[in-house]
Amino acid sequence: MKLLTILFGTFILALLGTLVFQGKADFLFSGNLGMAVFIIFTGFSHFKFQKGMAMMIPDFIPGKMFWVYFTGVLEIAAGIGLMIPSFREITAVLLIVFYVLVFIANINSSRKKINIFKADYTGPGMRYLYFQRIPMQIILIVWTWYFGIHLQ
């Protein structure tokens, strides 16, 4: 849930910043900035924890390292796309699809007790999926829809 701290922290700081510098809080900008910082941060983590992330990918998918790096680049691009108004809505739609698809890797990771930070099998297992990852995925999907599509 440390990642959600980045999302909510950035959102709150952006709200306060826009309130101070513009005279009113800008929810659309702040919500998209929060998600942009969040997704860019997770994108860069694909390059730091690549071995653990590769372990998450189901065995039947070839070229695991390619997909780890590719999705990391996609996440960074999505963060940038959310901050460009003309790309925001399509970026949000694609990001929601991405969140649904990547959930398969999260199920695989939980079943195998993968610890992505250590690249071993000492992870928390299914309780992580049920009590952290599923609630976080729901928050990410709803947040992306609300700020990237609904408020447009």
Image (cartoon, rainbow, N blue to C red):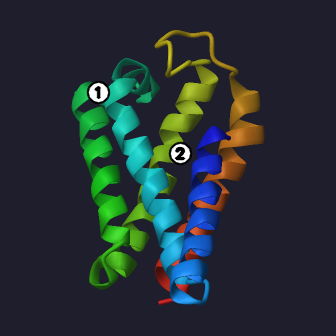
Q: From the viewer's perspective, is 44 left or right of 27?
A: left
On screen, residue 90 versus residue 146, left or right, reads left
Rendered location of residue 43, percent (x, y): 37, 43
Q: Quadrant of residue 142?
A: bottom right
Instruction: Tell me whether the residue at label 1 lies in contact with that at label 2, contact meaning CB atoms closer than 8 angstroms.
Output: no
**Residue sitting nearer the eye, 83 or 113:** 83
Instruction: State the residue at coordinates (42%, 71%).
Output: 92
Q: How many marks?
A: 2
Task: Tell me if residue 13 comes above or below residue 60 in the rendering.
Answer: below
Compared with 39, 19 (above or below) is below
Q: Is residue 60 left or right of residue 52?
A: left
Tell me which label, 1 or 2, sits earlier in the chain.
1
Residue 27 in view, yes or no: no
Q: Which mark is residue 146?
A: none
From the image, tell me which residue sits under label 2: 103
Residue 2 in picture, x, y percent from top left: 64, 39
Q: Quadrant of the N terminus?
A: top right
Residue 63 x, y percent position in the rendering:
22, 27
Marks 1 and 2 sit apart, C-alpha to C-alpha, by: 16 Å
Question: Which label number is shown at residue 64?
Answer: 1
In the rendered image of this protein, does residue 55 appear above or below residue 74?
Answer: above
Q: Would residue 150 be seen by someone viewing this image from the given angle?
A: yes
Badge 1 amino acid: Lys
Q: What amino acid is at disc 2?
A: Phe
Residue at image point 57% right, 10% down: 121
**Residue at 36% in and 60% down:** 79
Q: Can you give x and y, in whole percent of width and height, for residue 62 in the image?
A: 25, 27
